[in-house]
Image: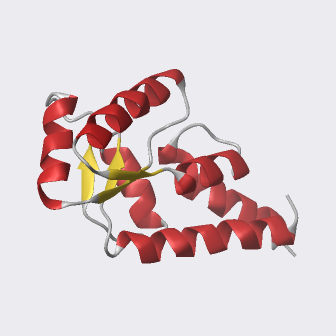
């Protein structure tokens, strides 16, 4: 990865920070929340895998929000959850924002949100080791 690609990643993280001030984030679990907080992202977080039925989590989101940022993993389980969440939330009138999920996970070459902070730190060390 070169410096310009890293700058684009950092711009995307900054965009996510700003958007998260007014829009909640749906993640799979607590480790995802911790990774995002390590990146300086403060938000209202909802966890899809918290022991409650997914439909109830979506109802809770829709009761107070018209938009949600979807940051689920790009592995098979995350993709399946994302599909169900988008279906439920669209029926409830909630706009689902996936841009950050697709951009960050792909650019940082990981499938899991919980690895984002470590990947950013590793790339930063590689680029600025001298």
Q: Judge by depth and name the residue closer to the eye, 119 or 83.
A: 83
Q: Position of residue 19 (x, y in %)?
A: 42, 72
> Is residue 109 among what the camera can see?
yes
The answer to whether 72 is drawn above or below residue 118 in the figure is: above
The answer to whether 103 is drawn above or below residue 47 in the figure is: below
Q: Who's the residue at 43% across and 60% down the image?
A: 36
Q: Position of residue 53 (x, y in %)?
A: 16, 27
Quadrant (top left/top right/bottom left/bottom right) for the N terminus: bottom right
Determine the image quadrant of residue 13. bottom right
Q: Who's the residue at 75% across and 73% down the image?
A: 7
Q: Who's the residue at 26% across and 59% down the image?
A: 66
> Is residue 40 among what the camera can see?
no
- How many tags in the picture? 0
Relative side of 28 to 18, left or right: left
Q: Judge by depth and name the residue closer to the eye, 105 or 35.
A: 105
Q: Position of residue 11 (x, y in %)?
A: 64, 74
Determine the image quadrant of residue 3. bottom right
Quadrant (top left/top right/bottom left/bottom right) for the C terminus: bottom right
Rendering colour mode:
secondary structure
């Amino acid at each position: 990865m070169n410096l310009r690609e890293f700058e684009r990643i950092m711009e995307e993280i900054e965009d996510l920070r700003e958007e998260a001030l007014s829009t909640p984030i749906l993640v799979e679990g607590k480790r995802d929340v911790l990774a995002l907080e390590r990146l300086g992202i403060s938000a209202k977080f909802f966890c899809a895998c918290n022991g409650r039925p997914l439909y109830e989590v979506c109802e809770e989101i829709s009761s107070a929000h018209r938009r949600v940022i979807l940051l689920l993993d790009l592995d098979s389980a995350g993709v399946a959850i994302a599909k169900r969440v988008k279906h439920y939330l669209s029926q409830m009138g909630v706009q689902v924002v996936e841009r950050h999920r697709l951009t960050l996970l792909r650019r940082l070459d990981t499938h899991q949100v919980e690895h984002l902070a470590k990947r950013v730190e590793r790339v930063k060390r590689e680029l600025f080791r001298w």
